[in-house]
Image (cartoon, helix red, strand yellow):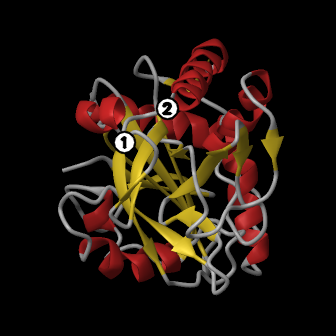
Amino acid sequence: MIPIAILTPDGVQPAPYVAESFAEATQYEPLGVYTIGRTYERDHVLLFDDHLDRLEQSARLEGVTAMLDRPKLRAALRQLIEQGGYAESRFRILIPNQTPDQVYLSVEPYKPVPTEVREHGAKVITVHKARHNPGAKTSAWMLERQGTVQSFPSDIYEGILIGDDGTLLEGTSSNFYAIVDGTLRTAVEGVLEGISRRTLMKVAPSVLPVDAGPVKLGDRLDEAFLTSAGRGVVPITEIDGITISSGEPGALTRRLRDAYDQWAREHWEKL
């Protein structure tokens, strides 16, 4: 069973349920807003305060007032990470809509991106599914997308949400990017600003020009990739069965991934 606890005004309390994973825990948790990240070198984190800033912002967008006690939250999360004893961990922090002073914390083993996907790229498909209040990271969306994700064929790594006009917006749990004529393209409206996206956009200008605008289904793409806090930069080599360029991760995507990983190593901090 994974470590789970609730941070309350009276201290850390045990959760009234047990689970073997985040996915299993969602059936017991109240609806709310959440964030997920990973550790580095066991107890180091990247942009942790950015995670918490976005968590509070997500709550505001859902009409919930939440003020996190950050020192106590960090201490409680450190305790869970020690309790789990994993070499590297994923962590999830959830603020319930109805009881925002009862913060749910959970930790599970971190599983890296499969070597095959990292080296040879991922296959994705487009998904015609609108996300309510895309600026907020909500557990309601996490539950809503569950059936869609579970229906993907076994070789599909991610689904990319597509707008009514064919705009490629974001992944079901990631941000999406394309490279066209040497320029980075990505949607900025109607998507969640991922924490990994912030890192990517810090390093991207040193690699290639950036155009804050999306691409559409059917556009010719030279390269494509996704980012998420737990996965970093993941190359995409096929969309809806159509191969992108050579069918292998492109040189610019690899340079962006290296720049992202280097920036992370230089900026992660002890929890």
Q: Residues within 10 Å of mark 1 (few under 14, many from 20)?
A: some
124 left or right, relative to 51:
left
Q: Is residue 10 above or below residue 147?
A: above
**Residue occupying image coordinates x 25% and y 56%:** 21
**Location of residue 152 in the rendering, given as x and y in whole percent from the top left corner:** 26, 71
- The amino acid type found where label 2 is placed reads Gly
Q: Nearer the viewer, residue 157 or 184?
A: 184
Q: Residues within 10 Å of mark 2 (few under 14, many from 20)?
A: many
Which residue is disc 2 drawn over? 250
Can see residue 128? Answer: yes
**Residue occupying image coordinates x 50% and y 73%:** 139
13 left or right, relative to 207:
left
Q: Nearer the viewer, residue 114 or 219?
A: 219
**Residue occupying image coordinates x 49% and y 83%:** 128
Which residue is disc 1 drawn over? 247
**Residue occupying image coordinates x 80% and y 34%:** 209
**Secondary structure state at the residue bearing disc 1:** loop
Q: Is residue 266 above or below residue 56?
A: above
